[in-house]
Image (cartoon, rainbow, N blue to C red):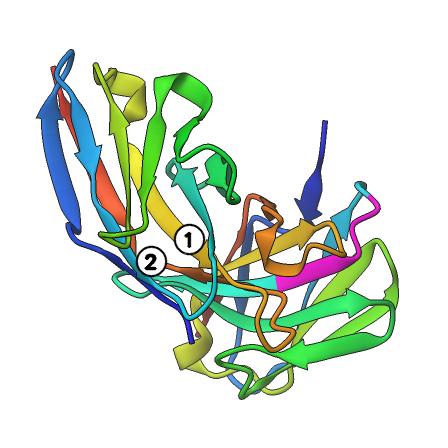
Amino acid sequence: DVKVTQSSRYLVKRTGEKVFLECVQDMDHENMFWYRQDPGLGLRLIYFSYDVKMKEKGDIPEGYSVSREKKERFSLILESASTNQTSMYLCAGSSGGGFSNQPQHFGDGTRLSIL
Amino acid sequence: AQSVTQLDSHVSVSEGTPVLLRCNYSSSYSPSLFWYVQHPNKGLQLLLKYTSAATLVKGINGFEAEFKKSETSFHLTKPSAHMSDAAEYFCVVGVGDTGRRALTFGSGTRLQVQP
């Protein structure tokens, strides 16, 4: 079965720290995505990648960056964590070619708290 | 541009009664539409998808949705609710315009199932 794995379920960090959230997929997906989920706001796209070393900004990229050095791994980086980045972070993958008509497969999420 | 509106933030039904979760979309192009379900502390799971084939789409766990272009709607239904259906549901639209390889999520509908 398809699988997207996020390295941490819960994470607590301090303001100003550099934070790495890791995501690995075993489905050979070309596309990978990072979202944050907040109550009442649904999912908001932070960044996505459609190939190794390629990335595009989503709707709320400020304060974040990403890295995709290998096809199966997509990392989200909080350059200098702030309390307003406390949230649930979800990683997803999808097949390429079909662009937005392809369903995405999600990991279980990382609940990040910034103190 | 594309957008999606879930008309109810909360829906409560009794076990064994029908479920209706409403979703309207807007899109300049022929859309792809999806419904996802999220159980507590889990990632999103795909329930069903519409990609311009049959307008009535059957999904997992007895759910189905009907694409109505004239009404720009894609409502999710189930004839008989089960306690395990209690979760948050997201309507999602994807449109392959301007190379955007991502999906737009609604803000979610929380379904409660009363015994």
Element type where label 1 sits in the image: strand
In three-dimensional space, the C-alpha distance between marks 2 and 1, rounded to whole angstroms, equals 6 Å
Neighbor class of circle 2 (other Cα within 10 Å; few <14, some 14-19, many 20+) is many
Q: Chain of mark 2?
A: B
Please report the bounds of the magenta region as a residue range. A28-33
B76 to A102, vertically: above or below: above
Q: In this image, B27 relative to B86: left or right?
A: right
A66 to B35, vertically: above or below: below
Snapshot quadrant of residue B63: top left
Q: Which mark is residue B92?
A: 1
At horizontal 21% and vertical 44% (from top left) the residue drawn is: B22
Neighbor class of circle 1 (other Cα within 10 Å; few <14, some 14-19, many 20+) is many
A32 part of magenta stretch: yes
Snapshot quadrant of residue A80: bottom right
- Mark 2 vs 1, N-terminal side: 1
Q: Which mark is residue B106?
A: 2
Q: Position of residue A71 (x, y in %)?
A: 87, 58
Q: In this image, B112 relative to A24: left or right?
A: left
Element type where label 2 sits in the image: loop
At horizontal 25% and vertical 62% (from top left) the residue drawn is: A40
Contact check, label 2 and label 1, Cβ < 8 Å: yes
A60 part of magenta stretch: no
A83 to B10, vertically: above or below: below
